[in-house]
Image: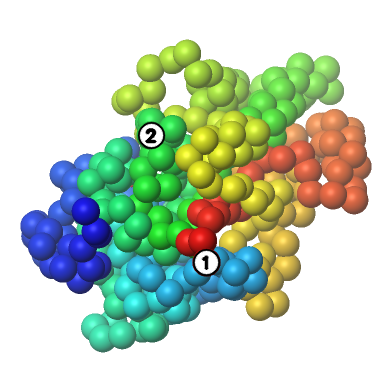
Amino acid sequence: MPSPSYDSWINGLPQWHGLTRISPERAYAHAEDQYDAQYGVSAAEPEEGQGLVRLLQREQVDVTGPALEIGCGTGRLTYGLAHYYPGSDFLITDPSPTFLRITASQFPAGPVGPAQLQFALLNADDLGKLPPEMFSLIAMRSTLHHILQVDEFIAACARTLRPGGALAMGAEPLESGYVLMAAVAQSILPTLKSAGVTINPAWETQLTNFTDTVKFYCRRDLVKVAAEDKHLFTIHDLSDLGHRHGLRLQYFPNATYADFAPDGTPEFESFSVFFLTYLKYCMQFDEELLKHIRRHMQPQLKFIDECHRSHAGPAITGVFLFHKAGAAA
Ligand SMILES: C[S@@+](CC[C@H](N)C(=O)[O-])C[C@H]1O[C@@H](n2cnc3c(N)ncnc32)[C@H](O)[C@@H]1O
């Protein structure tokens, strides 16, 4: 059966409190209005979305059809995509109505870029409900690791992408880099103790919480339905998964979308900078502990940085671009 047009599909979906509803609403596990403050970012900057559009154009992805963003959160990627995506439509989605409203509030009434914007409640588990070959772009930032059934999700993405389109993912956590961070973290307390530092019991809790969290993400034999963050990935698993569903993976090590914006300089400086930033913002380590880590863990951190002096490593995150082959001529 041929796919309906985007307009007839979207206009036929039910409404819920002013939002299009593809899935039932579901709140995020943490306070949505504090999300940007926790990560020390400002959502309303164009570089992430602008960089992604430039990367897609450079890699000759067909960007003429509608775009879909999954897990928009507070709009860190959305804002630039809304301004620069050259196709006709941009469907911005999240399961959380609060996140959708925060993101929608960044845009004035009326057009902001070439694409018409629409907002919908969508859980990635329901991607199979989308019509086949509807979207030229599926874009995500820091969302894949929240999705329970990654294999089914990639299969559904492959189905709803148009030939010549792409699935783009950024800021996903990779097993190699995260396990290395946790291994380094395991030696922090013994190192501080042997340097004569008085240990605050709260630091032990922060460190155990971090290493236990990494172990939980890494394990594949645990039930993760109730956890908000679920997985770490390997590049070869993602590549195999894409291949199985007809998608070719291009991986940009430790890159962010913003790196591809005009004047973008690589955000990733080194393992040690990433590690300390992650502990500060994502794990909320206190400043005193971070100060001791910078001082007493310097030999270990310097060693890892020097191993990667001439290339962006260890693989800890990056941009993942899955291409769907174009229609045969
Ligand atoms: C870490 S936040 C990232 C938000 C935003 N993309 C950013 O880069 O700041 C993860 C986002 O994924 C959404 N999310 C979680 N589980 C999801 C699922 N099963 N389907 C779709 N989105 C989901 C959350 O509501 C949240 O907005």
Residue 240 picture location, percent across and down: 59, 34
Give the residue at x 76% y 17%. 190
Q: Closer to the N terminus: mark 1 or mark 2?
A: 2
Compared across the picture, whether 138 is left or right of 312 comes to: left
- Residue farthest to the top, as pictured: 221
Q: Amino acid at mark 1?
A: Ala
Can residue 228 be seen in this snapshot? Answer: yes
Q: Relative to 29, say whether 134 is above or below.
A: below
In this view, the residue in front, 38 or 289, is 38
Q: Which residue is mark 2?
A: 152
> Which quadrant holds residue 5?
bottom left
- Residue farthest to the bottom, as pictured: 110
Q: Relative to 64, say whether 138 is above or below.
A: above
Residue 303 picture location, percent across and down: 89, 35
Give the residue at x 51% y 44%. 246
Label 1: state its secondary structure. loop
Q: Which residue is mark 1?
A: 329
Label 2: state its secondary structure. helix
Report whether the residue tagged 2 is closer than 8 Å to ligand 1.
no
Compared across the picture, whether 16 is left or right of 150 comes to: left
Residue 74 picture location, percent across and down: 37, 59
Give the residue at x 34% y 78%. 88
